[in-house]
Amino acid sequence: MIVVKHVVVAEIPLLEMVESDIDHQKLPTVLFYHGWGSCKESAMVNGYELAKQGFRAVLPEAYLHGERKEGTLNEEAYMEFWHVVAHSIEEFPTLTDYYISKGLTDPNRIGVTGLSMGGITTCALLTHYPSIKTAVCLMGSPAPVLFSRWLLNSSWAEGLNIDEANYQAELEQLKPIDLSLQPEKIAGRYLHFWHGTADNTVPYQPTLDFYERVINEQPEAAKHVSFTSTKGAGHKVPYESSVEMATFFAKHL
């Protein structure tokens, strides 16, 4: 039986999902990050699939979301998008250290995944934490700088008065977490992408372009970096792709 526990670690609420009969064992652990405007509970189908595979699934609540919400997220709040991602990056070691210190997580078998903003967070985490062994990006982007430029010309930014100087400064701050600018930080780790071809929220093509560039420039990467898509799918992860995500971790974590 899979149990769901509400846990708070250093004021970060999260859901933990795990098979009850192995709950107290040291397990491979996967953190799943939800999307913009959503909450940890919305990611439970993914946590369930991970737990079925014998993982400890940890579903953190993103900054300004769910239990951490400080107001209503609307289109103008997109300016906070990268601050939310930054919080998740900063909080990652707090969460993993907690589970490692409790003897509940194998420090050599830590994975990360997420959808949309959570997929963007997943790729950003790879630029900072070599301890991550395996990652899956679901309809996210490995290219924050390029994605931010796209956002500026999208409906997200309609009606907003963007200060060009501040905007350029923010782009510079994104470069350290941009995996597309430092693909060498994949460093032989297993990384899988899924993206719907008709996604108008986080564009499909830039992610495919990154994947193709990586395997063309680093032929050995084809052994550990993979990409699948669903033709005509928009910005929603099909159940089959959640299963695919969990299966990928079962094979490579």
Image: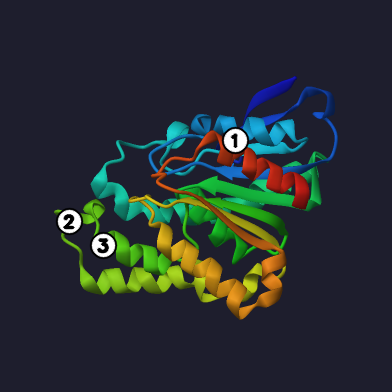
CA gap, disc 3 and disc 1: 31 Å
N-terminal of the pair, mark 3 or mark 1, is 1
Q: From the viewer's perspective, is the residue at label 2 or at label 1 nearer?
A: 1
Q: Residue at x 59, y 35 (%)?
A: 46
Q: CA distance from mark 2 to mark 3?
A: 9 Å
Q: Is residue 44 among what the camera can see? A: yes
Task: Tell me the quadrant of the picture where the N terminus can be found.
Answer: top right
Question: Which residue does the image show at 17% across and 54% down from the upper left?
Answer: 158
Q: Nearer the viewer, residue 215 or 34?
A: 215
Residue 213: x and y in percent read 54, 74
User: Which residue is under mark 2?
Assistant: 160
Q: Identify which residue, 165 or 149, lies in the foreground.
A: 149
Q: Amino acid at mark 2?
A: Leu
Residue 73, x across and y down, in percent: 31, 40
User: Which label was assigned to residue 152?
Assistant: 3
* Residue positioned 80% across, 39% down in the render: 104
The residue type indicated by label 3 comes to Leu
Instruction: Identify the disc placed on residue 46.
Output: 1
Residue count near mark 3 (Cα–Cα under 10 Å), binned few <14, some 14–19, many ≥20: some
Residue 35, image x and y in percent? 45, 43
Instruction: Tell me if 38 is positioned left or right of 154 in this view.
Output: right
Q: Where 124 falls versus 67 (above or below)?
A: below
Furthest toward the top, the residue is: 1
Between circles 3 and 1, the one closer to the viewer is 1
Q: Which residue occupies the foreground of this view, 202 or 156?
A: 202
Under tag 3, what secondary structure? Answer: helix
Q: Is residue 179 visible?
A: no
Estimate the spatial distance between the alpha carbons at disc 2 and disc 1, rounded to whole Å: 35 Å
Residue under the image location 72 percent in, 23 percent down: 2
Q: Secondary structure at mark 1?
A: helix
